[in-house]
Image: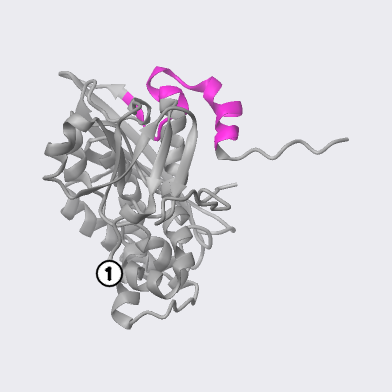
């Protein structure tokens, strides 16, 4: 008997879970759900799960594990232009997650609750004999009809990102004992960017009315842009010469130009990727964003190197299956 074909994350969702989706689920083609709230508002719902040994190192400081878990979800809310309201927390813990670990973990959550003005709404906790598994379900709020979705990109739009790209992926490489020939200062910066993403919540709210489509970058620039293009039924061009890079990433790239593939596909950026009409260019010039390409007819994502030639990447980004 022939072996059934392998299903990636999105094929699994389309086959087994999309038929179960309700009206607020956006067909499970976006990264959030929208539910009508009071007085012309909508609640934005998002959940993420992390597993020790896959999404974080068991030796990572518990406080930064907590903060990264929360910020991953807040980054999704930022990509929708939402204001965060609160979150639910689910933990499946091992015997290694003792009171000392929990004290540090909860302290990390408390610090971010103060920083982002949110609170814990509830959740669940169980014991596991497997790996530590942690999940947050975040709740945000937008004015009805204003959420930034993946599906609004149009041919002729420009392509933008916030912040800098590739820092977290390079930080992960350093965590895996690759030195990359960098100074201690640059190594510390990149590892911090991997451990503690910065959700662009204020920027996301400013993009409402300017961006035609948006999402945060978690699985890699090329992969996530591909999801946006699929939802919008368009194609995209990325110009690597225009990518915004930190001083640390530039130093790594100067020593090893092949790291451009890591920067394009590595994931964990948690920056906002969005498209906008040329008419919005003047207003966007006042915001901390960089134009990196354009939207064209067709399907898929094409990456151009510094000479304007198409690049072959091998993979688009992180794959969960």
Q: Is residue 67 above or below residue 178?
A: above
- Give the side of residue 222 with respect to residue 161, left or right: right
Q: Is residue 12 above or below residue 183?
A: above
Q: Is residue 282 above or below residue 149?
A: below
The percent position of residue 264, horizontal first and vertical second, equals 43, 54
Q: Is residue 306 visible?
A: yes
The crowd level at tag 1 (other Cα within 10 Å; few <14, some 14-19, many 20+) is: few
Disc 1: which residue: 247
The percent position of residue 169, horizontal first and vertical second, equals 42, 62
Q: Is residue 57 visible?
A: no
Along the line of sight, which residue is nearer the eye, 309 or 157? Answer: 309
Q: How is the image coloured?
A: one colour
Q: Residue at x 47, y 28 (%)?
A: 298
**Residue 15 belongs to magenta span:** yes
Span highlighted in magenta in the image: 10-34
Figure quadrant of residue 255? bottom left
The percent position of residue 181, horizontal first and vertical second, equals 41, 80
């Amino acid at each position: 008997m022939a072996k059934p074909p392998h299903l990636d994350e999105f094929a699994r969702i389309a086959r087994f879970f999309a038929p179960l989706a309700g009206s607020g689920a956006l067909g499970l083609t976006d990264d959030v759900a929208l539910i009508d709230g009071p007085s012309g508002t909508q609640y934005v719902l998002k959940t993420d799960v992390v597993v020790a040994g896959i999404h974080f190192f068991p030796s990572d400081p518990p406080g930064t594990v907590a903060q990264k878990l929360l910020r991953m979800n807040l980054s999704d809310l930022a990509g929708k232009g939402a204001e965060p309201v609160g979150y639910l927390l689910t933990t499946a813990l091992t015997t290694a997650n003792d009171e000392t670990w929990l004290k540090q973990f909860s302290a990390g959550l408390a610090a971010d609750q103060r920083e982002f003005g949110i609170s814990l709404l509830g959740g669940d906790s169980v014991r596991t004999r497997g790996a530590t598994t942690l999940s947050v379900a975040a709740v945000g709020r937008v004015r009805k009809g204003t959420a930034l979705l993946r599906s609004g990109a149009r041919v002729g739009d420009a392509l933008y990102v916030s912040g800098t790209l590739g820092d977290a992926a390079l930080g992960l490489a350093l965590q895996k004992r690759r030195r990359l020939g960098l100074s201690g200062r640059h190594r510390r910066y990149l590892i911090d960017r991997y451990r503690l993403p910065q959700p662009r919540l204020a920027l996301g709210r400013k993009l409402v009315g300017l961006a035609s489509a948006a999402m945060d970058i978690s699985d890699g620039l090329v992969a996530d842009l591909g999801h946006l293009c699929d939802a919008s039924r368009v194609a995209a061009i990325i110009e690597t010469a225009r990518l915004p890079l930190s001083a640390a990433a530039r130093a790594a790239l100067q020593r090893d130009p092949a790291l451009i593939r890591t920067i394009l596909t590595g994931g964990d950026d948690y920056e906002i990727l969005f498209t906008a009409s040329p008419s919005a260019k003047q207003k966007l010039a006042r915001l901390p964003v960089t134009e990196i390409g354009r939207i064209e007819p067709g399907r898929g994502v094409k990456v151009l190197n510094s000479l304007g030639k198409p690049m072959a990447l091998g993979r688009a980004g992180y794959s969960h299956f």
